Amino acid sequence: MRKFRKKKINSIPFDPDKQIAVIKSSICTGEQVAGFKNKEDGHFTDVMLIRNDKDLETFKEIYRIEEIKKEY
């Protein structure tokens, strides 16, 4: 019996025509959150916390993204 399981990431729809993949980074704490920014109104939808390079690669693989813009 496994006590801890890897958390399954619920896939949020990504439309590259209407959204941009973005990493929001806090200037104070350095916390990073990957998500999507709406091109029309600038609304940001957070998808997952980025703690290390492996998390970033996972995010890129799930959504088939090659390049991500970083904002502070």
Image: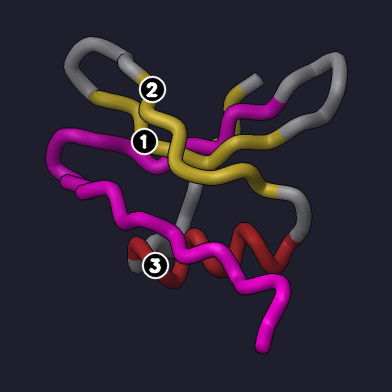
Task: Please say if 3 is above or below 2.
Answer: above
Which amino acid type is marked by label 3? Ile
Q: Is residue 28 left or right of residue 15?
A: right
User: Element type at marker 3?
Assistant: helix
Q: Residue 21's image quarter?
A: top left
Percent x, y of residue 49: 62, 43
Task: Please say if 65 is above or below 71.
Answer: below
> Going 45% across and 33% down the picture, which residue do you hit?
46
Percent x, y of residue 36: 36, 36
Earlier in the chain: of badge 1 and badge 2, it is 1
Q: Is residue 53 left or right of residue 21?
A: right
Earlier in the chain: of badge 2 and badge 3, it is 2
Q: Label 2: which residue?
A: 44
Task: Please say if 25 is above or below 57.
Answer: above
Q: Label 1: which residue?
A: 36
Per the picture, the main secondary structure of the magenta-coloured stretch is loop
Membership of 13 in magenta stretch: yes
Q: Which mark is residue 20?
A: none
Answer whether labels 1 and 2 touch (C-beta < 8 Å).
yes
- How dense is the environment of label 1, judged by Cα within 10 Å: few (below 14), some, or many (20 and up)? many
Q: Label 3: which residue?
A: 62
Q: Which residues are magenta?
A: 1-25
User: Element type at marker 1?
Assistant: strand
Which amino acid type is marked by label 2? Phe
Calculate the distance from the C-alpha at mark 1 to the C-alpha at mark 2.
Answer: 6 Å
Earlier in the chain: of badge 3 and badge 1, it is 1
> Going 34% across and 62% down the picture, which residue do you hit?
63
- State how the image is colored: secondary structure
Q: Is residue 62 left or right of residue 6?
A: left
